[in-house]
Image: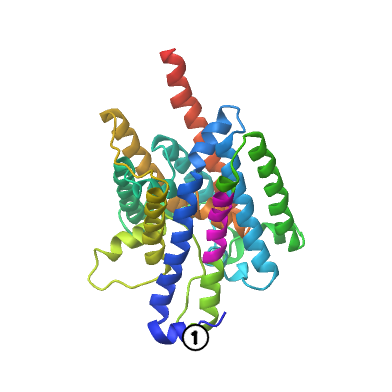
Amino acid sequence: MDLIPLIDRIGESPTAALFGLITGLIFGIAAQRSKFCLRAATVEFARGQMGPRVAVWLLTFSTALVWVQGARHFGLFNSDDARMMAVAGSWSGAVIGGLIFGVGMVLARGCSGRLLVLAATGNLRSIVSGLIFAVVAQMSLHGMLAPLRDYLARLWVTPGGRNVDLLAMLHLPAISGLLLGLALAALALIVSYRNKISARTLIFASGVGFAVATGWVLTYSLAQVAFEPVSITSATFSGPSANTLMFFLTPNPVLEFDIGLVPGVVIGAFMASLWGREFKFEGFDTAGNMRRAMIGAVLMGFGAMLAGGCAIGAGVTGGSIFAGTAWLALFCMWIGAMLTDFIVDQAGQRAVA
């Protein structure tokens, strides 16, 4: 991929933002049409079902592994250079932040990525929750919550100043990641078949995984030819949401991948909702639901920054390169979400009955 003509024409920073926009467009369209949502999958699983939401999430996760590990196998991407792998990870942050994020995800009725997609389809609840999430994420990164986040993250960190590559740690051949992705994809197709999920939904679910691989490959390709250092990253919505918010609030903003990613998701999801005739304005039903969503957004904002990423950033994007803390954070998100559903929602339903 020869990026020199493009860089010479528009510059390195605009190119990075353009790549973020492309990644976001693919993600927004695919996520909206497939209804991809980790929260929905965890709730379904917590209630003893391997239903359509689990199938969609599993297919997204598995295809992300296939696309990313395939790109790595063919030399289109090197995960060792990824920003998530190049810095020390936090085991304590993954556990504590993952659990907190999982709780917030259920209370807010959607992870940060899902909230962004829903906001683009006219869901006013998601707009409010998404803005709170972005503000708290920024507070956790550079504001009054940063000292607490930093303290919790430093309790237990990965050795050597880098994150842990699970494949290398387990002394597995590099091809193992691709093979695992194919095995999980086969399982996802079996679950999808049992739930009679349409081929269109399956294609869009795999498209979310493809968006993750697109971000990795594009930023890696740019980093190889750029004069200035370029962060090799992909789809995530904790840091980018905070960065996009500050982009419009600071006097001299700088274009980067994150700044293109969030608007790309919004545009893609908006177009997909119009295409599917699903765009409609929705608000909060009750004041109680609004309080619940706001509390959930606060927990997600802090939890995501502590865990090193949101349900997409750590759960799928980080998981696709086998970053150790990302897999641990994803596991804890599942646990936190399932416990919250059992204690809050299922217990409430039993009390009403």
Q: Is residue 186 left or right of residue 353?
A: right
Depicted 70 relative to depicted 36: above or below:
below
Location of the N terminus by quadrant is: bottom right
Q: Which residues are magenta?
A: 203-215
In the image, 170 versus 36, the foreground residue is 36
- What element does badge 1 sit on? helix
Location of the C terminus by quadrant is: top left
Residue displayed at 70% across by 68% down: 73
Q: Is residue 199 magenta?
A: no
Q: Is residue 204 magenta?
A: yes
Q: Position of residue 229 (x, y in %)?
A: 47, 78
Residue displayed at 56% across by 69% down: 217
Q: Position of residue 9 (x, y in %)?
A: 40, 85
In the image, 213 versus 156, the foreground residue is 213
Query: Circle 1: is it few (<14), some (14-19), or many (20+) Cα within 10 Å?
Result: few
Name the residue carrying label 1. 4
* Residue found at the far top of this picture: 353
Dominant secondary structure of the magenta stretch? helix
Residue displayed at 38% across by 82% down: 10
